[in-house]
Image (tube, rainbow, N blue to C red):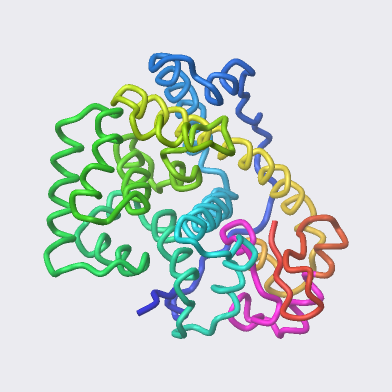
Amino acid sequence: MILRPNPSRQRVVEPARPEPSTPTTPVPSWLRQAAQQPLTLEDAAIAAGAALGALDHVIRRQARWAGVWRQRLALAAAAVTARQAGRIEDEATLRDAVLLTRPGDDVGPAGSFVLAWRRLVGRPAETLLTAPSIAAVLDEFGLPHDDGVASELADDLRQLSAGEGLVGMLAGVFAVAERHSFGRVVGLWLADALLAQRLGWTYAVPLLGTAGALGVRPNRARRSANDIAATRGEDEADRTKNLLAMQAGAALRAIDLSAELKRRADRLLAVAPKLRAKGADTVVGHLLDDDALMASRGDKTAGMSDRGLRRLFDRLVELGAVRELSGRPTFRIYGL
């Protein structure tokens, strides 16, 4: 069953107003270089710690655009999952799979990947690793499982979190997932959830989920057969170094995306007072919370007619506050 928001719940909408000006998180050049190609395990650990510290600053800012930021990262993670599953859907196709499907209808296997990663970013981090949540995400990844396996996974993860440091915990997640025959995709999801709990974040952020296969070195797009064989023979230190480097790189990409979305959100909030349409504040709130909106669902978005919502989006595009994301003349989709 596909989980959908309850339409009866009313969103509390605050009047749109620009946020106080806050500087974007600076990322020094040495950190980008260290994350891209760490020479030693110690270099990778320093890079990962520095990158996570910078990311923590972004998260604890609790910006109004944090919702769309997490949703975009979830979409990116779903696209990585689709590629790892041998599928061809990109981010735009995955977005369509969810937005163009009526509530209650099947979004398809690839669309379910989006739901799995949206589960990670849309629910409080403290609830993600309960047995019901793990069972649901296994279903969304299309992985069959016996009754009780989710409870066993939850117990294993609690023990891992209590008995290991951060590095050992993240490395151990994949061993736990593979021991239950779920592979690395589930390990990526669980690792990102565990990290959020360990660092005390209210909501998780897809990091390793956006980074791709763990066996790929962060600075190599292609590998020869000898490279692959060497990767398989890496010792534990090398695997840990690559894991930390991937996490550092993913954190820096998340920071870069936050800076981009902050600029777009600031523009949206700056032009919001010029909007006279009834329900405009509600639409602005949705744009700051969601990856994208359809112009043909005005009644569900803000109690507006479809025509009224299309006119509002046209106005926002004209003001440079939102973009049309599909490139289609019909069934258009808008977002920051």
Task: Indicate the quadrant where residue 318 lies.
Answer: bottom right
What is the residue that sits farthest to the right in this orientation? 318
x and y percent of residue 305 in the render?
A: 71, 85
Q: Determine whether, in the image, residue 155 is placed left or right of residue 4.
A: left
Residue in the image at 67% along x and 43% along y = 262
Q: How many marks?
A: 0
Residue in the image at 26% along x and 60% along y = 134
Quadrant location of the C terminus?
bottom right
Task: Indicate the quadrant where residue 335 lies.
Answer: bottom right
Q: Is residue 298 above or below residue 236?
A: below
Q: Determine whether, in the image, residue 198 is placed left or right of residue 67.
A: left
Magenta residues, start to end:
286-313
Q: State the residue in front, 22 or 322.
A: 322
x and y percent of residue 277 in the render?
A: 77, 73
Q: State the residue in front, 183 or 261.
A: 183
Quadrant location of the N terminus?
bottom left
Q: Determine whether, in the image, residue 261 is placed left or right of residue 89.
A: right
x and y percent of residue 177 in the render?
A: 24, 49
Q: State the residue in front, 283 or 201.
A: 201
x and y percent of residue 202 in the render?
A: 38, 46
Residue in the image at 37% along x and 47% along y = 188
Residue in the image at 18% along x and 49% along y = 179
| Magenta stretch, main secondary structure class | helix
What is the residue that sits farthest to the front in this orientation? 226
Task: Indicate the quadrant where residue 173 lies.
Answer: top left
Q: Is residue 252 magenta-colored?
A: no
